[in-house]
Amino acid sequence: MTASRSVFVAASVLLCCGPVTASPVPAAGQVITEVAATATPPAGRWAWPLAPRPPVVHAFVPPESTYGAGHRGVDLGARVGDPVLAVADGTVTHVGVVAGRGTVSITHADGVRSTYEPVTAAVVEGQSLSAEDAVGSLEDADGHCAPAACLHLGALRDRTYLDPMLFLTRPRIVLLPPLPSR
Ligand SMILES: [Zn+2]
């Protein structure tokens, strides 16, 4: 009750004091996204969970509501059996099977959880891990990126899904020379 009330209060503040636009009042899911966006973590805190650095095949799409459509993580191109690595130091807080897919969650010092699926776990709940320690191996699970295989990496703060790319190394920025003036 207290937690949901504080979220409501935070959302109210955003609604009250944000930039005034002609757009309609945002839906609940959009408010959650805005709350999440206020706590932008520094990029580069997480290591990539696959080596070598994998391609991002599907980006994060914020859900429209708590149970609404969206893509609650990023999909990283991989092969079945590839070692899956912890993105940062932390403690394994969940190992299980969700909808037929092996999942592992690691809680980090800042309270953010990283989630990995489909993974055949090589760790147990309560286990401490360092960054890039093995979590398990990519499972042969149908569907998510069929016919290719991929690792779905998620990032959660409490019950809010964040874009894992906020934590991972940002792409290198290439500075282009200024355009010639006319
Ligand atoms: Zn995914």
Image (spheres, helix red, strand yellow):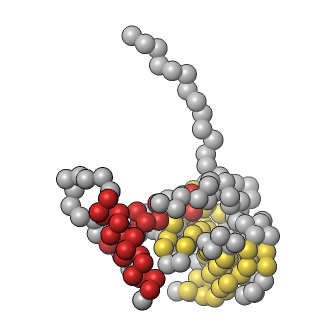
x then y, percent, for residue 35: 43, 66
x then y, percent, for residue 30: 35, 66
In the rendered view, does 126 fall on the left or right side of 179?
right
Above or below, 181 against 149 in this view is: above
x then y, percent, for residue 53: 69, 54
Q: Tell me which corner region of the image, top left, top right, bottom left or bottom right, holds residue 133.
A: bottom right
Residue at horizontal 32%, vertical 59%?
17
x then y, percent, for residue 23: 22, 56
In the rendered view, does 176 fall on the left or right side of 130?
left
| Count of number-bearing discs | 0
In-front residue for pair 123/167: 167
Query: Can residue 147 be seen from the camera position used here?
Result: no
Q: Tell me which corner region of the image, top left, top right, bottom left or bottom right, holds residue 171.
A: top right
Q: Which quarter of the image is occupied by the N terminus?
A: bottom left
In-front residue for pair 90/173: 90
Residue at horizontal 60%, vertical 88%?
97
Above or below, 95 against 10 in this view is: below
In the rendered view, does 125 fall on the left or right side of 154?
right
Query: Can residue 98 be seen from the camera position used here?
Result: yes
Above or below, 13 against 68 in this view is: above
In the rendered view, does 168 fall on the left or right side of 132?
left
Q: Which quarter of the image is occupied by the C terminus?
A: top left
Q: Tell me which corner region of the image, top left, top right, bottom left or bottom right, holds residue 139.
A: bottom right
Residue at horizontal 72%, vertical 87%?
125
Residue at horizontal 57%, vertical 62%?
164
